[in-house]
Image (cartoon, rainbow, N blue to C red):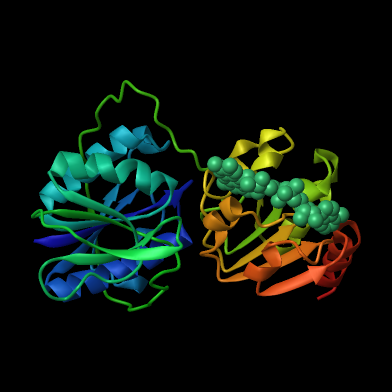
Amino acid sequence: MSVLVVAESSEGKLKKSTFEVVAYGKKVAEQLGTNMVVLAINANEPNQLYTYGAEKVLSVTNDALKTFNAKIYANVIQQAAEKESAAVVVVESNANGLYVAPMVAVSLNAGFASNVVALPSSTAPFTVKRKAFSSKGFNNTQITTDVKVIALAKNSYGLVEGEVAGTIEEFSPSVIESGVSSTSIEQTTGKITIADADIVVSGGRGLKGPENWGMVEELAEVLGAATACSKPVSDLGWRSHSEHVGQTGKPVASNLYIAIGISGAIQHLAGINSSKVKVVINTDPEAPFFKAADYGIVGDAFEVVPKLIEKLKNF
Ligand code: FAD
C-alpha cells in the first residue's frame, strides 16, 4: 500500500505548487503508516522532490506526454497507482488536476474529493475537509472506497520541507491513443499561469478598454505576477478568456491579489477569496470589494498604478 502523489511540471520545470502537494502527501502517508511515491512526468529535475519528503520518485520521460491530455494522463496515473498499490492518490486541485482526477477515480473504482484543505482524519472513516459553496464554507466528506483520490486546494497545507535521501525509478507506462482533444486550459508558455502565481494583478471594467492594459502588464512584470481580469472584461474581448477569474472563471489562491477597477461582485469574490492578501484600487469608496480587502486605495487607477510601478521599480 502507498500514497501516490502526482507532481505537475511545466516545460520540464516542476511547479512550485506541486511541492505543497508532495509535502501534504508525505504527511498523509505518515498518518496511514505507509510510504509515499511521487509520479513525475517529464520533469527535468525530479530530485527536487526529495526536499519535500519524496523517498521514491517514479520518473516518466515520454514525448507523447509533453502536452497535457487528461485522458492520456489519467491512464498513466492509473498505471502508476496500480503498480504502487496506491490506497490514496493525491493531485493538485487546479484546472488540470480537476480534469484528470475524476477519470483516475473512475478507472480505480475510487471515491473522489476535490478542494481538500486539510489532512484526512487520523481515524476511520477516511474523512476530508473541503471547501464548499464557492469557498464560502466547508464540509467534511467521507470516502468509503478502498482507494481514494483527493485533490488538494492550493495554499491550504504549506510548503513544508523535510529533506530525505530519495531514489528515482524510471517508469515507462504504455501511452494510449486519446482520440479526443482534452488539452490543458492552463497557459503554459511565456507567462506565469494564474494557478502557479504567488501574485496576481487583475483588472476590471474600470480600466475602460483594452488599450489601458499596458500598466496592468507592467505592474505584473515588476512584481513577477500573473495577469487576470473580471468576467465582463473577457466577455468584451478586452482580454483572453484564460484570464477570467471568479466563480465561473479560474479560481485564484495566490499570496497577493491586486484588483484594479473591479467592483467586487459576489461572483468575482467567490473565485478569489482564497487569496491571502487582497489589495483593491477603486475610485468608489463604496465598492463592495473594500469590505473583502486587506488593503484598499480609494483612487483613480490611472494615477495610482503608474505611481506604484515607479515606486516598485526604485525599490
Ligand atoms: P464593474 O462592476 O463595472 O466595476 C468596475 C469598477 O471599476 C467599479 O467599482 C468602479 O468604481 C471602478 N472604477 C471605475 N473607474 C475607475 C478608475 N479610473 N480607477 C479605479 N477604479 C475605477 N464576474 C467575475 O469577475 N467573475 C466571474 O466568474 C463571474 N461569474 C458570474 C456568474 C454569474 C452567474 C453572474 C450573473 C455574474 C458573474 N460575474 C462574474 C459578473 C459579476 O456579477 C460582475 O458583473 C462583474 O464581476 C463586474 O466586473 P467589474 O468589477 O470588472 O466591472
Compared to 110, does 278 lie above or below? below
Residue with the most extreme top position? 179
Q: Is residue 238 left or right of residue 125?
A: right
Residue 50 can be seen in this image: no
Name the image quarter holding residue 266: bottom right
The count of marks equals 0
Q: Position of residue 223 (x, y in %)?
A: 71, 64
Compared to 113, does 42 lie above or below? above
Compared to 210, does 21 lie above or below? below
Compared to 26, does 172 lie above or below? above
Image point (29%, 72%), residue name:
53
Residue 199 can be seen in this image: yes
Q: Position of residue 177 (x, y in %)?
A: 28, 24
Viewer-closest of 276 and 247: 247
Viewer-closest of 9 and 266: 266
Q: Quadrant of the C terminus?
A: bottom right
Q: Position of residue 262 (x, y in %)?
A: 72, 54
Name the image quarter holding residue 295: bottom right
Q: Quadrant of the N terminus?
A: bottom left
Viewer-closest of 27 and 171: 27
Q: Position of residue 229 (x, y in %)?
A: 67, 48
Name the image quarter holding residue 166: bottom left
Image point (44%, 62%), residue name:
154
Residue with the most extreme right position? 303
Q: Is residue 48 left or right of residue 77?
A: right
